Amino acid sequence: MTSRPPAALPKTWSPLDFGLHAFLVVNPFALGLWIFSLAPLVGGNLFLAVVLAGVVILLGAVVYGALAARWPWTGGDYAWQTRLLGARFGAVVALTSWWLVVALLAPVYGNVIVVQALDPLLMHAGWDGVASWFHSREGTFAASLMAVGVAAAFVGLGMRRAAIAQRVLVVMGSAALVVVLALLVTGDLAAVSKEFDAKAANVYGASPLASAQIVEIGGFDAKVTEVEPGGTFRLVPLLLLFGLWIGWAGPLIGEVRARKPASVSLALVRVAAVSTVASLFFLVAIGRGSTWEFWNEANNLYWGTLHGTTAATPLSAWPSPVVLAAWLTDSTLVQIAIIAGMAAWVLGWTATLFLSATRVLLAAASDRVLPNAVSRTTGDSVPLVALGLLVIPACALAAVDAYWDAFAEWSAVAVIALAVTTAGSGAAAVAGFRREHRSLAAISALFVLLVVLTIGVWVLDPVYGMRTFGALAFLAALYGISAGVYAVSRRRERKALVTMADASG
């Protein structure tokens, strides 16, 4: 075991910048809303599930915060695991997630951009044809490239300017969020139903009785007062599909200036708390503005229509609560402004895709697992080769995802690799703290157990669709590629040592 940091970069971020980056990753107004809408497919009480998932996220914040405070190394997961658990284990596990899986995620980000931002904006602007094109294979590929472009541009800003961009996006998103919450909370239910029918007919060509039809044919009985223990516990792994990545900013810790190491840990704990509380407030506002039952019925019909398990939904678009709130205003320009303001959360979330990953690749290069060129950077500028290792395969894989349906189904299993890496860092915390801080080691062990249970549900529960032979074989292939890269690097290093020995002899 070594305590040598893998790389040293200028410390240009504050703990606040670090926390904002972490919050943009797990903010409930981007991927979170998408995940919330899937709840009817599982059942259970979403409010209670958010609280339970929040406990897991909080534990993750404590674990990652402790690791970052004790070992503030560039590379995060990679650095901690290679130094606390072993070079081979850390390199294979971390590189699979932070290189191969990150390159696979562009279609996920592109899809959320389309559904939550582009589609409603284009439809409200009257550009129906452009909106429809983004749902074609070509449009799907273009959306993925858009996500890659946003993520790459964010890295290209450099750390200092990226921090400023984050703050601007959070301010814009927060201002829009206040408006959305105010509209939902103060809206009269009768008026909400009337405006929904009018705007749904005008924007999406729905029936003028769409709200009544959704309630009549929805077939999903969701009551806030029902606990449903079995379904509620099954919902927690669903919510962790967006909330478990509380440590996503970890690889950037080497660039954070902190007078007190505890400030970094506190930043992550605050992120976990704010994300959970914001989720609950938003769900309460949705229930107050449209009734909880109506929103669940609309979601159930939307997903049921896609999978052919329910009658066709009267509303052809994803039932966005942001759009629902915007419809409580009469001005189209105001509606577009609200949707665009909330899209700042989606844009900020998308921007986080590559930044941390470049630092993992940089750290791996400093350990000679990857070529030295990957670690070349000046100041807080772009590590160009590391960015290229992400952008090029991301574009290629996005094309495969858009035009090959089977591959799109397999790639979903990549989320398991992310969770394995998260559990690996938890195990690294157990190893690192087991003597000096036994309480942190115990918390880390509990977190690892919960992550492993979550992975088990994802694999075994058919609702997640992650236990097909093709998906699991694809996951094994990803680990095989990383293992091959590590083996080649060790062979190259041994040859270099032999050459040096021969030269000195």
Image (cartoon, grey):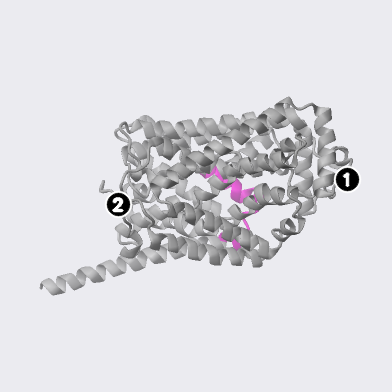
Other residues around mark 2 within 10 Å, as few (<14) / some (14–19) / many (≥20) = some
Classify residue 26 as left or right of residue 44: left
Task: Give the secondary structure at mark 1.
Answer: loop
Name the residue that disc number 1 marks. 207
Q: Main secondary structure of the magenta part?
A: helix
Q: Is residue 76 above or below residue 436?
A: below
The percent position of residue 117, horizontal first and vertical second, equals 65, 48
Q: In the image, what residue occupies the spot 50% across and 38% down?
A: 23
| Quadrant position of residue 437 | top left
Give the residue at x 89% y 42%. Answer: 208
Q: Which residues are magenta?
A: 452-472
Q: Mark number for residue 7?
A: 2
Q: Residues within 10 Å of mark 1 (few under 14, many from 20)?
A: some
Q: Residue at x 30, y 57 (%)?
A: 366
Does any portion of residue 17 appear in the rendered image? yes
List x then y, in percent, for residue 455. 55, 47
Q: Is residue 314 magenta?
A: no
Q: Nearer the viewer, residue 341 or 302?
A: 341
> Given the image, on which type of amino acid does mark 1 rest?
Ser
Seen in the picture, residue 242 relative to 193 is either above or below; the reply is: below
Q: Residue 10: x, y in percent? A: 30, 47
The answer to whether residue 115 is left or right of residue 486 is: right
**Front-lying residue, 138 or 299:** 138
Which label lies toward us, 2 or 1? 1
